[in-house]
């Protein structure tokens, strides 16, 4: 009986505090028995945050230099790694007119990349020069060869490149058999007008790759990942002719169709999900890019693209590669890089690679588990004393489908939080994308750990805006993150894509 009276007394005091206007603080101490959402740090499947740097050795040979964001001159590979890039793509030409992209140059660059911890993708063009969606010239030494000999050429050359890499202790994670082969490869014999022959060429390359390194994944690469009818028709033909490969690879350049990445990304994810369903194979964006002189627009579109590919059905999106991000304009007049031509520093666009979806400890930070409403909102808990009806999920996220809203038609105090346990001690960064009407007496993102509590008041913004809580020290393997708002009727805030990473 005494215990019951004590419980009633505590409940009365709690209700009195709420009624008297005492705010629910992010500094709260959870009541005994309060349920919290916990996550344990786990190793998620690898997701390639890639850069194609086929021009880098030529840039270095011509005296081009690179600076990090702080203006410190460094090896470009080190800067890319600092920016979150974990994979490098290198192109290979059979007998180029100069030494760049030759087997020797390719091998030297691959050794450098692998020693710095990057996974390596090899892009075999099967040409002495550019092979792409418009042109697929055969190597000069192969031009008079009949089809049977051409198949032998493909096998021997592929084996030679792979074996040279192996002798230098490089084991590519991925190998492209051809580059943007929409019209075929090694024309005229490998024309897409004859998918039987084209499929045999691809299979010969596949056999040579696997003969040297069975663990390397073979990619067939075409342009237009957002063009479902053309992509499906191409891979339908390969499937009908029993072409051997492991991954569907795509170039993705909305710029050339007069669109932005953000405008076209929904079509891309819809197309890729459909292709995954049809062919039961994983997919990658092996080339993309947008305007270097619009870094914020490129950052937003690239960040959204990466998020969508990482969240394709069944985890079948394996990665995104930016094509020649380090190529500032004065080198090759390439407009779609991600380096500033004046300062020789990476632009804001490269910050998108800092947000690898597979390294985010907040697995429900994008609120994509679906429409819901407090007190338990898609993997989060409401703060003690919150008006749970003010916390809900709405359609239209910063990326993908949903975001969280805190709003009510009467005055309210409300918030969400999540406690993560079993994470490694160290320094962390919490990032989120927010919108906010303003007018609240308090509207804060916070991170709480044994090292202290950091708060950040949300800026007033009608468009999605990135906010960052930096240098969060975790010393006991635990951190709490959350959002809290005390507001008048009609004040609102949105939040999406919360991202917690160890620095």
Image: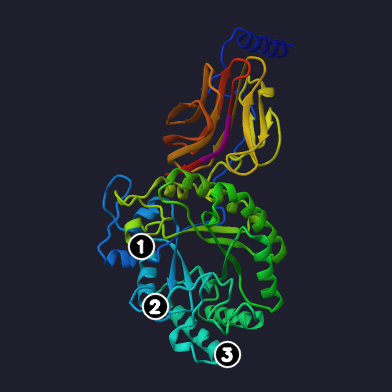
**Label whose residue precedes the other's in the sequence (2 or 1):** 2
* Residue closest to the far right: 1
Note whether 198 is above or below 449 in the view shown: below
Comparing marks 2 and 1, which lies closer to the viewer? 1
Residue name at image x 56 percent, y 83 percent = 188
Q: Which mark is residue 147?
A: 3
Helix, strand or loop under label 3: helix
Near mark 2 (Cα within 10 A), the count class, few <14, some 14-19 or many ≥20, is many
Disc 3 and disc 2: Cα gap in Å?
Answer: 24 Å
| Quadrant in which residue 9 is drawn | top right
Residue name at image x 61 percent, y 41 percent = 364
Residue 42 seen in render: no
Q: Is residue 498 magenta?
A: yes
Q: Which mark is residue 377?
A: none
**Residue 339 point in image, percent of width and height:** 37, 52
Q: Which residues are magenta?
A: 494-499
Which residue does the numbered mark 1 point to in the structure image? 332
Helix, strand or loop under label 2: helix
Whether tag 3 and tag 1 are in contact, CB under 8 A, the answer is: no
Comparing marks 3 and 1, which lies closer to the viewer? 1
Q: Which mark is residue 103?
A: 2
């Amino acid at each position: 009986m005494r215990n019951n009276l004590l419980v009633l007394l505590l409940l009365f005091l709690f209700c009195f505090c709420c009624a008297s206007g005492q705010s629910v603080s992010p500094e709260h101490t959870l009541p005994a028995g309060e349920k919290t959402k916990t996550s344990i740090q786990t190793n998620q499947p690898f997701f390639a945050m890639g850069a194609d740097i086929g021009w880098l050795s030529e840039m270095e040979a011509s005296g081009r230099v690179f600076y990090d964001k702080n203006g410190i001159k460094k090896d470009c590979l080190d800067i890319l790694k600092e920016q979150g890039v974990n994979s490098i793509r290198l192109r290979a030409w059979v007998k180029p007119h100069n030494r760049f992209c030759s087997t020797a140059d390719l091998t030297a660059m691959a050794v450098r990349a692998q020693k710095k911890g990057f996974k390596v993708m090899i892009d075999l063009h099967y040409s002495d020069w550019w092979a792409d969606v418009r042109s697929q010239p055969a190597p000069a030494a192969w031009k008079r060869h009949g089809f049977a000999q051409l198949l032998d050429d493909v096998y021997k050359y592929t084996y030679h490149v792979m074996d040279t890499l192996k002798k230098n202790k490089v084991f590519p994670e991925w190998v492209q058999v051809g580059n943007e082969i929409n019209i075929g490869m090694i024309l005229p014999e490998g024309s897409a007008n004859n998918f039987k022959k084209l499929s045999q060429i691809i299979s010969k390359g596949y056999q040579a790759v696997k003969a040297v390194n069975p663990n390397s994944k073979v990619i067939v690469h075409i342009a237009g990942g957002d063009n479902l009818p053309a992509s499906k028709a191409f891979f339908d033909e390969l499937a009908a002719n029993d072409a051997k490969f492991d991954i569907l690879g795509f170039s993705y350049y909305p710029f050339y169709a007069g669109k932005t990445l953000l405008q076209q990304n929904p079509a891309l994810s819809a197309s890729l999900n459909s292709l995954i369903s049809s062919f039961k194979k994983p997919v990658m964006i092996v080339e993309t890019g947008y305007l270097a002189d619009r870094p914020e627009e490129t950052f937003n579109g690239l960040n959204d693209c990466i998020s969508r590919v990482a969240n394709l059905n069944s985890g079948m999106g394996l990665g995104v590669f930016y094509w020649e991000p380090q190529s500032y304009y004065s080198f090759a007049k390439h407009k779609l890089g991600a380096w500033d031509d004046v300062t020789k520093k990476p632009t804001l666009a490269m910050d998108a690679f800092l947000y690898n979806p597979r390294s985010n400890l907040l697995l429900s930070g994008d609120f994509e588990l679906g429409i819901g409403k407090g007190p338990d909102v898609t993997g989060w808990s409401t703060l003690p004393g919150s008006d749970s009806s003010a916390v809900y999920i709405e359609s239209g996220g910063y990326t993908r489908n949903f975001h969280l809203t805190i709003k009510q038609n009467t005055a309210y105090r409300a918030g969400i939080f999540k406690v993560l346990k079993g994470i490694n001690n160290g320094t962390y960064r919490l990032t989120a994308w927010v919108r906010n009407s303003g007018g609240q007496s308090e509207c804060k993102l916070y991170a709480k750990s044994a090292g202290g509590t950091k708060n950040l008041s949300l800026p007033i913004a009608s468009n999605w805006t990135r906010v960052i809580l930096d240098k969060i020290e975790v010393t006991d393997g635990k951190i709490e993150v959350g959002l809290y708002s005390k507001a008048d009727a009609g004040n609102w805030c949105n939040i999406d894509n919360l991202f917690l990473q160890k620095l």
